Amino acid sequence: MPQEQYPHRSTMHASEGPQVYKVGIYGWRKRCLYFFVLLLMILILVNLAMTIWILKVMNFTIDGMGNLRITEKGLKLEGDSEFLKPLYAKEIRSRPGNPLYFQSARNVTVNILNEKTKVLTRLVTGPQAVEAHSQKFEVKTLSGKLLFSADDNEVVVGAERLRVLGAEGTVFPKSIETPNVRADPFKELR
């Protein structure tokens, strides 16, 4: 059958080989792609270095972070610490043999709350005064003996001896009852 009968067939010359189409990215697009991959790798390395630096500076370990350690009994904080918001804790203790310091630019307030978060007792130590807001205030010795007690009804002084050191002494607007009144040794009783 002659070739003229198949017009749909393309005519190929014997000298031409099969055409090859290039697949992929070439030229300036390829260079931009390599640049972005290199930039991404640099950013990953910088990010990894910054993460390691932050972990080192903040002293992150398996036990905790910085001066804060996680123990079986709770959190253990070593060294000076600053709290910007209220601190809620069941118990705050210093290490044995070391004092516990509270330092504030304004005041230190300790609140005792009930289950409904209503304040039952408040101790405020400020720059001008120490205030205790409660139903009863007591001062006791280490052995538990009452030295001073105050509530709405009465003030009790439980010490063996009460000394008034003011220059003018003390003034009682009504009567006073005592088993003994005496002056300092070698001084007059007036």
Image (tube, helix red, strand yellow):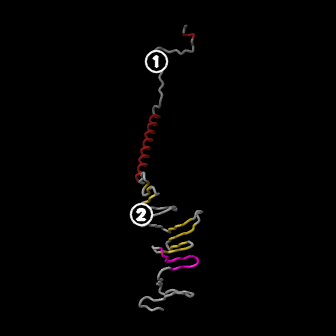
Q: Measuring from the top left, give residue 143's x and y in whole percent.
A: 45, 73
Q: Quadrant of the N terminus?
A: top right
Q: Measuring from the top left, give residue 45's x and y in whole percent.
A: 42, 44
Q: Residue at x 47, y 14 (%)?
A: 14
Within 10 Å of disc 1 (Cα), the crowding (few <14, some 14-19, many 20+) is few
Residue 78 vs 137, above or below: the answer is above
Q: Residue at x 41, y 47 (%)?
A: 49
Within 10 Å of disc 2 (Cα), the crowding (few <14, some 14-19, many 20+) is few
Residue 75 vs 168, above or below: the answer is above
Asked if labels 1 and 2 touch by Cβ distance under 8 angstroms, the answer is: no
Q: Give the magenta part as a residue range.
A: 144-157
Q: Measuring from the top left, give residue 169's x and y in whole percent.
A: 49, 87
Q: Residue 178 shows which numbered tag? A: none
Q: CA distance from mark 2 to mark 1?
A: 90 Å
Local SS, label 1: loop
Among the 4 quarters of the image, the one containing residue 95: bottom left
Q: Main secondary structure of the magenta part?
A: strand
Q: Nearer the viewer, residue 37 or 66?
A: 66
Local SS, label 2: loop
**Considering only order in the chain, which callout, 1 or 2, is on the residue closer to the N terminus?**
1
Looking at this rendering, what residue extends furthest in the top direction? Answer: 1
Residue 30 vs 16, above or below: the answer is below
Label 1: which residue? 17
Residue 163 vs 132, above or below: the answer is below
Q: Residue at x 53, y 79 (%)?
A: 156
Q: Residue at x 54, y 10 (%)?
A: 3
Q: Residue 95 shows which numbered tag? A: 2
